[in-house]
Amino acid sequence: MLYWSPKNHVSLSPRARHTKSKRWPRLQRFYRQNECCDWLKEYKMRHRVGIQIRRTVESISKRFFTEVPCVGQVLGDSFAEIESLGMPEHFCEDELLFILNSDERKSLTLKYYAKKILYFLRQQNILKHLKTFLEQPAEQQSALEGAVLVDQYCNPLADVTLDSISAQLDEMAEKVKKMLRIKNPSHPSLRIAQGDHFVIEDFELQRQVVCALNSVLYEQLQYKGNEFDYYNPFNSYIHQVLLCRTGIPISLSVLYMTLAHKLGVQLEPVNFPNHFLLRWCQKPRGSEDIYDFVYIDAFGKGKQLTAKECEYLIGHQVTADYYSAISTTEVLLRMVGNLLNIGKRGEGNEKSYQLLRDSLDLYLTISPDNVQYLLLQARLYFHLGIWPEKVLDILQHIQALDPSQHGAVGYLVQHTLEHIQHKKHPVTPEVKRRSASEHLEVKYSVGLIMKHKRSGYNCVIYGWDPKCTMSQEWITTMRVHQLSNGAKQPFYNVLVQDGTCRYAAQENLEPHSGPLEIGHPEVGRYFTEFADTHYVANEELQTRYPEDMNETLGTVQELYNRLTPGSGSQEQASATDQTDHQATPV
């Protein structure tokens, strides 16, 4: 219970105080116990912020709705709107979370945009923390804290904090101490308290720590390198490494090095090509002879290697420079670079574009003058058709850094300006009425939950065409000509349960036999509610398909009557089902 100052007691009744605490429980953590505060002012501010945020979120769908999913959509203008309101950040976030945690099946469009805004606001906050982190002296920068910031930026909606990650590592360090106590009850690491910075100089005592650490990490806790799913971005997120106990060389090295430091052993990160390593000096500190170090492969269960053996890992010789210790900033660049490469290897879907955007943001925050990645960022935004004004800013920066890029920059500037001009004169969206003569063969309607007869996937319809509108190349690749009705039949835009968007022929679809929610991230873009048997189109989708919702209601009612005992011939329903499933579409 928050402290109530007598000065303000008449300003807010006990009932109102209770209402504030009950309605906005997440805000309690922002106030210290027994804190004197003008609670009436706080209450009014929170209420006002809630109204303003909700209005802003509600307006976004009208301005940004497109019938075709925009991969990597960025709502830059709306984010700037919320930032410009000058409202307390924790109140903004609390209202967005309030929207997201309301009834699961309703206000889907509101939640869809609230989630995007929350994602953006948290990322902006994390970038501020990262910039502050990078401004610290190199010796004060912790690789673990940097790894947590990378994790948080790529997973802003997850509950990842430095305190929670550090607490897990403290528990692991205690397990190592327990192992050490068995081997050497007088070991100095046992006297190191949490937060102490104590370095053990004796090599034999260091060796005992490393042996105990290997035993706990790889034998007791079963940590290992993820050889089978190496390019999964989860391997780079420290909270996932701790959860799954798998990772890649750099993430496991950060974990290993942090634990060793907690126990008094100084290890240094080595930016070895294709396989990140740690080095452990076997001579008095200060030596730079590569043969004075043992190299630890955290990915290989803590195996200790000589300089020559390190080359066997990658199959070729390298110069002595690759054995040098690197800074925390360089560790983060390597970590973010890995994520960037995973994003570039992606399949061109929402997740891979999001990862590519996030990792580019991080890389250019750490190394803002990297022309190669600035140009990649400009091309990515241009390709996705997002933030054209920001593209121009990036291109101007590239031109100032490297005038030799004039050709590539000029091309992008010209086409970006054309895109900005096009945005000023948007095309009026087509309205499709089922009653129009050219649409009479369209059998299904938006909001219906369907099943693909051939592929077996479940989906929901969010759009349709009276005939296939894709290119001839697509039609040939997808073997549309092998369908009994070819490309001249109606085709449907569908959101699939597996998170993909597909374009399906009418003859391949049939209504799903029972209630089913479609767990697709774009559902909220088109629908405002899941109504047990179907999805209710939002205002924007209904404007495009003004006659579809009545058709959808009629279809689900007909399906219900056909399948419900007593509402018709069950034998007939069964026979109809068999006929539907006996079709053999290509």
Image: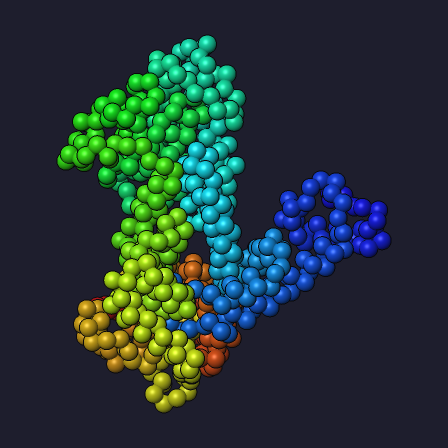
**Is residue 81 left or right of 279 when viewed as pictured?**
right
In the picture as drawn, the residue positioned furthest to the bottom comes out as 437
Residue 418 percent across, percent down from the top left: 35, 77
Image quarter in which the N terminus is found: top right
Q: Nearer the viewer, residue 27 or 536?
A: 27
**Is residue 418 left or right of 169 when viewed as pictured?**
left
| Labels in figure, total | 0
Residue 175 percent across, percent down from the top left: 45, 22
The answer to whether 63 is drawn above or below residue 336 in the figure is below
Identified at 31% across, 32% down, the residue is 325
Q: In the picture, residue 391 is in which quadrant?
A: bottom left
The answer to whether 65 is drawn above or below residue 94 in the figure is below
Colour scheme of the picture:
rainbow
Residue 273 percent across, percent down from the top left: 23, 39
**Is residue 156 left or right of 283 when viewed as pictured?**
right
* Residue 430 visible, this angle: yes
In the picture as drawn, the residue positioned furthest to the left comes out as 316
The answer to whether 292 is drawn above or below residue 428 in the figure is above
* Residue 554 visible, this angle: no
Image quarter in which the C terminus is found: bottom left
Residue 2 percent across, percent down from the top left: 73, 44
The answer to whether 331 is drawn above or below residue 119 in the figure is above
Identified at 21% across, 30% down, the residue is 310
Identified at 17% across, 31% down, the residue is 312
Identified at 55% across, 66% down, the residue is 81
